Amino acid sequence: VSSTLLFFIFGSICYYRHFEPTLKSHPKFLKNQVRQEIRESMLTLLIGNILTAPIFVAQIRGYSKLYGSPEEGPGYWYEAAQFLFFLAFSDTMMYWLHRLFHLPLLFNTMHKGHHRFIIPTPFSAYAFNPIEAYIMSLPIHAYGFILPMSKFAYLVIFLMTNIWSFLLHDSQDTFHTVHHKNVKFNFGQFLPLWDQLAGTHQDPVYFFSSKKRSV
């Protein structure tokens, strides 16, 4: 229930504040697209919650390295540093997982459905194959089993990562929008670092300016 509520709250805010309504007239904007995005996201959330339940049980039973107060962690310095460590960990994992789902077999069986939204709205943030979405969510949870993580940081990161997913799909002329228009580029989640290192980076300013020049 809470995940559905968050989906509609943050999805609606991002949709009405960031998504350009005129894009719904774009020839590549699908008929009843928003309805499709919401329906698929709801299914993904339902199945994802079921699949993620064992992770939460493991956390409750003390199998993770989550901790409560700063005194229980590695030190006060870590309270800020853990966000940077998570960023490095998550961006690395998400980049290569995303690349994995662009291999022909996985792309055609799972990821391709998400890419039919060439002009995505924020409601497409979870419109993935449910199994794929679950796998892509694992870095958020895995960090706290590998390295210490405060429960506060875990909650903040969980919320911010989900909000970021909505913003990534607002179809503004930004980093991830390039990926929806050309699947060869911009696989990263937060930073372009791995795209730059792996040769898959496309600057959105250049990409969209060249698109306009070619029209």
Image (tube, rainbow, N blue to C red):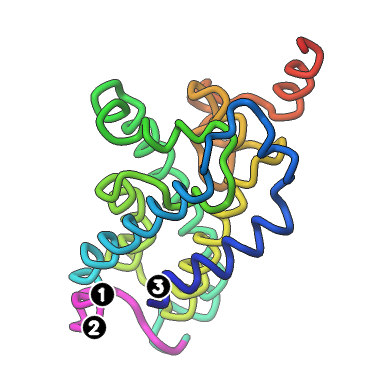
Task: Tell whether label 1 touches label 2 (CB within 8 Å).
Answer: yes
Label 3 Cα crowd, 10 Å radius (few <14 / some 14-19 / many 20+)? many
Looking at the picture, how far across and down is residue 3, in whole percent? 41, 71
For image coordinates 21% across by 62% down, the residue present is: 51
Q: In this view, does 100 lie to the left or right of 156?
A: left
Q: Residue lying farthest top?
A: 214
Q: Name the residue under label 1.
A: 56
Foreground disc of the pair 3, 1:
1
Residue 64 located within the stretch drawn in magenta: yes
Residue 97 located within the stretch drawn in magenta: no
Q: Mark 2 points at which residue?
A: 60
- What's the amino acid at mark 2? Ile
**Mark 1 falls on what kind of element?**
helix
**Looking at this view, is 177 or 119 the one in front?**
119
Looking at the picture, how far across and down is residue 15, in whole percent? 65, 55
Calculate the distance from the C-alpha at mark 2 to the C-alpha at mark 3.
Answer: 14 Å
For the N terminus, which image quadrant?
bottom left
Q: Is residue 82 visible?
A: no
**Looking at this view, is 139 or 73 the one in front?**
139
For image coordinates 25% across by 48% down, the residue present is: 131
Please state the extent of the stretch shown in magenta in the rendering. 56-69
Q: Mark 3 points at which residue?
A: 149
- What's the amino acid at mark 3? Met
Residue 208, above or below 119 = above
Task: Kindly indicate the quadrant of the structure image that contains residue 98.
Answer: top left
Foreground disc of the pair 2, 3:
2
Looking at the picture, how far across and down is residue 102, in whole percent? 36, 27
Calculate the distance from the C-alpha at mark 3 to the C-alpha at mark 1.
Answer: 14 Å
Q: Residue lying farthest front?
A: 31
